[in-house]
Image: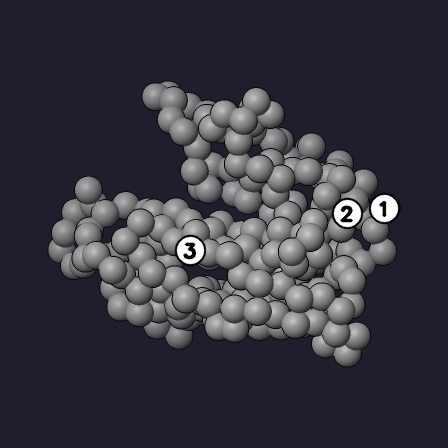
């Protein structure tokens, strides 16, 4: 069973009461930046609602099931200012606007038309131990190569934010539907900050989806 908005809203207030670092805009992404799992409690794949029934993908469950106990101490956060959303009042067909959409600091990455090497930028804020080191772990979608620069983030007392660039390349020219992967930052301990990735390779706009 998917999580309802009522459940999410209740848990947001619970987390806010338990933690000092959450700001109103930070509550919008806490349940995505630290998903507990993509399987159900029995370890089986999550099934999407609807008929015919299918195994769920990130378009169905987002970052995964909420784990409030772990979300109190997520390690890293992807902060998004509400003004960043209102700035996107433009035509997506415009190349400048498309770049702004791709680089919105969401706890997820979606590339709807991967024709050529494409890069996006994300920024994370360290909300845990001041002196922390995170290394990247990438699960690339099939037929897609992902590189991350830098691959290691070193935080300190005076440096609690880091930006990183994620570059996507097609290794196989296959026209198809969305493919899924993930990107995670791990500190070697309890913090494993994962975000979902969705990529749709496009060879030609004249080809129909497979």
Question: Which label's residue is closer to the chain start, 2 or 1?
Answer: 1
Q: Is residue 81 left or right of residue 210?
A: right
**Pointer 3 with pointer 1, Cβ within 8 A:** no
- Residue drawn at the location 71% of the way across and 66% of the way down: 132
Is residue 210 visible to us here?
Answer: yes
Characterize the local packing of mark 3: few (<14), some (14-19) or many (20 or more) Cα atoms within 10 angstroms: some
Tag of residue 110? 3
Query: Residue 94, image x and y in percent?
Result: 35, 70
Tag of residue 18? 1
Q: Nearer the viewer, residue 190 or 68?
A: 190
Q: How far apart are the alpha carbons under marks 2 and 1?
A: 7 Å
Question: Which label's residue is closer to the chain start, 3 or 2?
Answer: 2
Characterize the local packing of mark 2: few (<14), some (14-19) or many (20 or more) Cα atoms within 10 angstroms: many
- Residue drawn at the location 56% of the way across and 51% of the way down: 194
| Residue that mark 2 sits on | 72
Residue 75 occupies quadrant: bottom right
**Pointer 2 with pointer 1, Cβ within 8 A:** yes
Q: SS for tag 2?
A: loop
Query: Residue 103, image x and y in percent?
Result: 49, 67
Is residue 112 visible to us here?
Answer: no
- 153 shown above or below 200: below
Closer mark to the observer between disc 3 and disc 2: 2
Q: How far apart are the alpha carbons under marks 3 and 1?
A: 32 Å
Query: Residue 67, image x and y in percent?
Result: 68, 38
């Amino acid at each position: 069973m998917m999580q309802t908005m009522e459940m999410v809203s209740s848990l947001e207030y619970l987390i806010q009461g338990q933690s000092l670092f959450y700001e109103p805009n930070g509550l919008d992404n806490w349940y995505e930046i630290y998903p507990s799992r993509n399987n159900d409690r029995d370890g089986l794949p999550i099934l999407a609602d609807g008929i015919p029934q299918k195994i769920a993908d990130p378009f169905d469950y987002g970052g995964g099931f909420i784990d409030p106990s772990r979300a109190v101490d997520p390690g890293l956060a992807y902060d998004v200012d509400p003004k960043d959303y209102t700035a996107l009042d433009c035509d997506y067909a415009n190349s400048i606007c498309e770049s702004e959409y791709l680089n919105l600091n969401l706890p997820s990455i979606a590339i709807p038309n991967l024709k050529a090497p494409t890069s996006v930028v994300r920024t994370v804020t360290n909300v845990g131990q001041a002196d922390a080191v995170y290394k990247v772990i990438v699960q690339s979608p099939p037929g897609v190569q992902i590189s991350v620069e830098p691959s290691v983030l070193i935080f300190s007392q005076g440096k609690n934010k880091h930006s990183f660039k994620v570059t996507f390349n097609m290794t196989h020219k296959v026209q198809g539907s969305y493919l899924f992967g993930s990107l995670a930052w791990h500190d070697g301990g309890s913090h494993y900050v994962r975000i979902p990735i969705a990529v749709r390779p496009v060879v030609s706009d004249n080809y129909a989806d497979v």
